[in-house]
Amino acid sequence: MIGRALGLLLTGAMLASCAASAPQPAASVGPIRFAGPAKNLVLPVTELPTGTRITTEGPLTAGDLDDALTTGDPGALVALLDQHLFIAAYVRTFTVQKGAGSTADLECIVLLFPDKSGPQAVVSDRGDAMLAYGYRPISVRQTFGDSSRAVAANGVIKDPSGGQMSVTSVRILYALANVAVQISIEDEPQNVDPLDAVELANRELQYLRLSAPLAPK
């Protein structure tokens, strides 16, 4: 029910935005190519329901991404990014208001490459690495962009007091043209609904297709 409620909020925001202000990309011949800066490719808070706030945002280096996305193989992602001439990345995290005073914390990371081979490699390599690390595939009944992976895992982390807290992590990783996108949720199991990640992944995809700068490849 929580995921459906958030879905209705996000869908309403999407329809209002598309009807009122979202610019249409210019027609291009053949494959598209996204232009930078990477910050402009991440879903803005104005595209989300009223009351949503940004909790953190900023650019990410290859080293930052290795720390954030690597699952048990430090340095491997840096090498992969270097191989595919990684240009830039940007992260934005949101707190979305839901029903009964509850919230959902979601993260969106966009990686920009010169061509589509980089995003495809990231989705394939990181998807396999997450499965090997203990994530399990989850069904979201769709493919995002050109290729995608959706996974989840349960674990234990330290809470602010130093005690242990059970968490569930959901990640959706997808490639579209020359960008890779990762949507993440990590919270206590009772607060995590994979549909929240699905809704944000779709909203980011819609934003990229309708609002982000495009140019012929």
Image (spheres, rainbow, N blue to C red):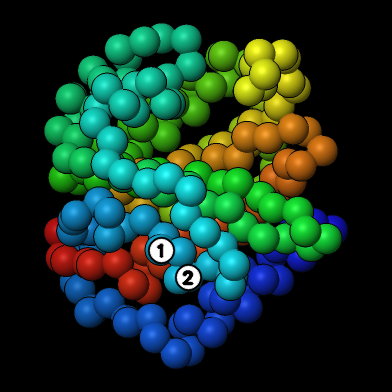
Which amino acid, mark 1? Pro
Q: Position of residue 200 (x, y in %)?
A: 56, 56
Quarter of the view holding residue 75:
top left
Residue nearest the viewer, comparing 140 with 154: 154
> Mark 1: which secondary structure?
loop
Residue sitting at x 27%, y 54%:
39
Quarter of the view holding residue 161:
top right
Looking at the image, residue 104 lies above or below residue 122: below
Residue 47: which disc? Answer: 2
Residue sitting at x 74%, y 46%:
193
Residue 20: which disc? Answer: none
Looking at the image, residue 139 lies above or below residue 132: below
- Determine contact: label 1, label 2, CB under 8 Å: yes
- Can I make out residue 154 in this image? no
Residue sitting at x 73%, y 41%:
192
Q: Where is residue 203 in the image (x, y as percent from the top left)?
A: 51, 63
Residue found at the very far front of the displayed protein: 161
Dot 2: few (<14), some (14–19), or many (≥20) neighbours within 10 Å?
Answer: some
Which amino acid, mark 2? Glu
Q: Give the distance between the C-alpha atoms of the residues marked 1 and 2, in whole angstroms.
A: 6 Å
Q: Where is residue 170 in the image (x, y as percent from the top left)?
A: 63, 36
Residue found at the very far bottom of the displayed protein: 20
Q: Position of residue 26 (x, y in %)?
A: 22, 79
Residue nearest the viewer, comparing 31 with 191: 191
> Mark 2: which secondary structure?
helix
Dot 1: few (<14), some (14–19), or many (≥20) neighbours within 10 Å?
Answer: some
From the viewer's perspective, is 148 left or right of 64? right
Residue nearest the viewer, comparing 16 with 174: 16
In the rendered picture of this protein, how many numbered marks are placed on residues? 2
From the viewer's perspective, is 150 left or right of 79? right
Which residue bears the numbered disc 1?
44
